[in-house]
Image (tube, grey):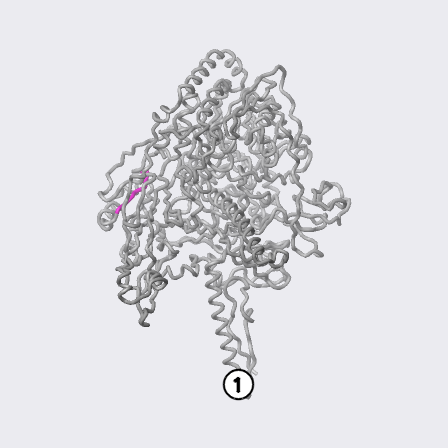
Amino acid sequence: MDTVEAPSMRAGLGHTSLPSYGASASFTASRTRYDPSDLQDLLGEHQEAVAAATKEKARVKGESVLRITRYESRERPQDRWRGHRTRLGVRDEVSGDGGGFGGEPLFTIADRDRLQPPQDESFRQALSPDFTAARNMRSFVQVLTTPTADTPGTTLMLHFDDKRYLIGSLGEGTQRATVQMGARLLKVNECFLTGRTEWSNTGGLIGMILTLADAAASSKSASTEDARKKAMAKARKLGVLEDAEKVREVEQEMLQGLPTNVLTLFSPPNLNHTLATARRFVFRKGMPVSVHEIPSEHENETGENGAKAYWADSNIKVWPMSILPESSPGSRPTSQSHSISPRKRSIEEVYEGETSNGSQPVIADDLTPTERDQLTVKAVVGEMFNSSWRLDTLFPTRLTDVKMPATIFVRDQTTHKIEKYRGLTPGGRLPLPDPDLQVLVRKPWPGALVETLPPTLPAKEAVSYIIRNHKQRGKFFPEKAKALKVPVGRAWSQLQSGESVENTDGEMVHPDQVLGPSKEGGGFAVVDLPDSDYIANLIARPEWQNESIMAGVGAIVWICGPGVATDERLRTFMSDAMGKLQHVVSSPDYCPNNVALDSAAAATVRLRQVDDRHYRVPTYDNTCVAQSPLPSNAQAAVRGQLVQLEPAMEVQNKQNVPLLDVEAVEGETSTDVLDEAARARESVSSDSAAIESWAATLPDRNVEITTLGTGSALPSKYRNVSATLMRVPGWGNLLFDCGENTLGQLRRVFPPDEMRQVLQDLRAVTISHMHADHHLGTVGVLKAWYTQVHSATPSPPPSLDTDLHALFTPDQNRLAILAEPAMLHWLSEYAAVEDFGFSRIAPLSVGAAFPAKNQASKMNWFIPPSDLAAMTARNRSARFANNHISPSLLGLSDVQAVLVQHCHGARAISITWPNGFKASYSGDCRPSAAFSKIGKGSTVVIHEATFDDELQGDAEAKNHSTTSEALGVAQAMGAKCCVLTHFSQRYQKLPVLEYANGSGGELEEDLPMLEAAAPEEAEDHRDTDEDDELIGADAAADAQTYADQPTSASNGDGGQTYALPPKVAPKPSNVTTTSAASPFAPSAVKFKLQSDMKVCVAFDYMRVKLGEIAEMQHYTPALLKLFEEDKDQPEHVVAANGAAKKKANGAANGGVKKSKGERKSG
């Protein structure tokens, strides 16, 4: 008997089920008794299976999101992750023990489709060159940003009635600029990133995705609730309300029809890698993100009917152009390259071990190493934004098997409720009383378990796009249809949709018999040239000569780096080869440094009228002197400018946002406010002796504090996210936190010459915790510092023999980053994507102090876990022995940090200088007794005051402080002055202080757990605040601090959802609050001080020296008057959809109404 084996039926992703065909099919045929019908039947079944596989593969390609959604508690990472994979909304379980692929590869040739652009079945026809759409309504491209201090890149929005598309840069400040412009981001499902993958283009993307994810989650929640109501109504109509099973079926039917929000990003190479580096602090559910990178070798296909689009939907077709600079030898290697740290292990090295059944994993030969690397990071990104992980899912295990650190829960034997376990934990000095006690633990989200990503190198490819509306059908002529005897009604609609129909005589009538000539869809190109090395290859692209691509293209938007737009080659290309097109040029050579955040600028102008010593008009420039004029068919880009595509191609300037008019803003301030401000200045003058006496007690009265971002969570029109600059004379500059677009804020506060000096003097950056609104501006600031101080020249990484102390000599000019390991790990990983200066910084991990145990903080040079794993035991011991960094190496006397109640790893820090000056910074937290102890004797305390006192319950539930609580902490320290910051974008009140006799009071030790417990006990302080939930959960801010957990064999590996113990009930506030009738009206909080501590409330762009803080309290009446004047007109803008929702919350938004000057500026 011979055996004939049918080809493999495995297609699609993972183990896609096919009809009776798993991996192969075989049959046996006799040589002497052979029935051809048997073979024919089998081949017929085989062909059906092949057809089914092909259909399934096409469907999966359009609908699936590659995600690794399960891991097992096993020693080696690849055994955890090779569990099962899913399609969007469909789970494919792997047969066997559930622990691995049993020798199957993690990725196969079928997964290569995931590296191609998404091609949803409904849009597949739209890719065809001859596809003709119905007549479109008006469509246009609008310029949202041009290169300014606020917005480093150029962002465009393509508008259709039903959809929006973001195109260009998504750098820092983009989200805030879209809020300012009123752009509706909720209609955005596709983004087309141009240029190179570097922070100036992608720095705002993570924050924007998080905002869109939260908005999508809210929308989905509302839609789900509405669907359930409709299901109940339908069940009532059907008379099945009493049948629970029928009601469930009806509900499922309704829920299945709900759309899934998927964000698709088209980009240059390395964007997946960029996003994957954020896996330890970004976590969202229900917002699938699919990134499609355009490689340098991509060529747009040309067939018989013309050029096939790379991607298309019902509105547009897209042809990308990936361009390398002339100096580039070709596409970059990835899989064989090394990151900046040569000792890092790639994810493949981590995963390539024994599988759960003891066999070696099979590596698919038909996928290149680069493709496997790309699929790996895509899988990690998928897990970050669409995970099935839940905070309230707990897994049973024995107490002795729990891997610390972990939060442990137990079930109360009496009440049967879940509560926190408070007993001894594994790994301690004392033996466990009951090692076999059944406890419940969480598992970290899978992304946190990936120690190291595949290696990569900075990508040189710069991506541009040609985007075109579909060809439009001609006008329908009813009289022709009537003459051809086509009945009125559905047949007419079919003809207008391009379908042939039968007339009353049974004859076929075709669309071209009743329609006028079709019209090419309007289109435009977006060309991004970072520098002049890209010009020659751009001009040589074949797309410019391809009529099937360029038909209908009427304009080019140029996004140019410095010196590119003035290059004679490009100017000639615009005027000659592309002379029939209109050109819009967005370049620092032609676009002035206009104010892009008009509302914030107007707010500062009005604050300056009240207090001109501490507020100044933001630095800006409304003119730009170009070296040479643009060609006659070109013009400079301006915010608000439109390139209309339909109904006719036209560049329109009537919507351009006019320039900021400072005089107009000042002219709207009432005389009552100005009179109150004058009285404040008189009060300061009359009190000058007392102010001077107080200032003389300060160790350094000339320390200057500049508040760059004073809002919480999302950047708003009036307040940016957290960042505070402190300039210490004779020492240098320090940044407390560095939220998104901190660099832009610095460039608005300081003129160019002073800005250069600020960067030259920058000595340290401290990051309080891993919420994105506190650190996403770090890379931008570091790169500007690196360029200014080191001319962007890297330094070799320290070797095992390097004396780390020698790296702090003055000639090294290193910038210290004081943070938790998770932050430093992120920076080290991102350094493989872009040289932003990581080799020049001093990455210092600050350990937490425990004052109750007399345990002080220590600073250590950060070593990535992968580097440690690659060392021998002897080398590791030698490195640890040399790893401690003394504060004296930074010119400091002491650096202390404590864990605070906010999110995992959140720290408050206190820094002391040799002259006795001491500064303490809270980050985000509940009031902390431990913080008050390390901050004893502080000269200045910078403390968050997110909520007003009447929102005490919100502050406790969301792990923030109220105004009075913040003042109480500072007073307990005996601080000389306090700066309040980090205000909710919705609420803020000014403190009205009353002084009483007596010395500083003692703060109640409200967080004894943080002082008495081990560091891991503090990890469960989870933040669910809309003002700070940019991490999403309290699992895995750092891969080192979270362990994977084993589970009881008797219970399997399935976790269960439990009702977790609630937080402590809110305490009633005992603070007096005066307020207007409206709940959003500006008001004041009265607080009784027991010391001579001076207080100021921070607004963005405030500059104040410590010796001047006593003056600022005199301006409180004038500020209240300013806010009161504006209470009827302030705007609260929802960042997710850009809609300006009017609410009377002037104080919350910086207390300024939208003046004439602001209206003139957008």
In the rendered image of this protein, does residue 986 appear above or below residue 1122?
Answer: below
Query: From what the image shows, is residue 230 above or below residue 206?
Result: below
Q: What secondary structure is the stretch in magenta mostly built from?
A: strand
**Could you tell me if residue 215 is visible in this image?**
yes
Q: Is residue 1097 magenta?
A: no
Q: Tell me residue 850's x, y (percent).
A: 65, 32
- Left/right placement of residue 504 relative to residue 1138 reads left
- Region rendered in magenta: 582-588
Label 1 environment density (alpha carbons within 10 Å; few <14, some 14–19, many ≥20)? few
Judging depth in this view, the residue of 1038 and 62 nearest the camera is 62
Q: Tell me which residue sits at (29%, 40%) in the image.
A: 653
Residue farthest to the right, as pictured: 433
Q: Mark 1 — residue?
A: 35
Is 186 on the left or on the right of 1065, as rendered?
A: left
Q: Residue at x 69, y 34 (%)?
A: 1012
Q: Quadrant of residue 352?
A: bottom right
- Whether residue 730 is visible: no
> Which residue is at the far bottom?
32
Q: Nearer the viewer, residue 485 or 786?
A: 485
- Pick the front one: 803 or 565: 565
Amino acid of disc 1: Asp
Quarter-of-image position of residue 142: top left
Disc 1, SS: loop
Residue 23 percent across, percent down from the top left: 55, 69
Q: Quadrant of the C terminus?
A: top left
Specify the quadrant that holds the N terminus: bottom right
User: How many marks are shown on the rendered structure?
Assistant: 1
Q: Position of residue 68 (x, y in %)?
A: 55, 55
| Residue 906 image position (x, y, % from top left) | 58, 36
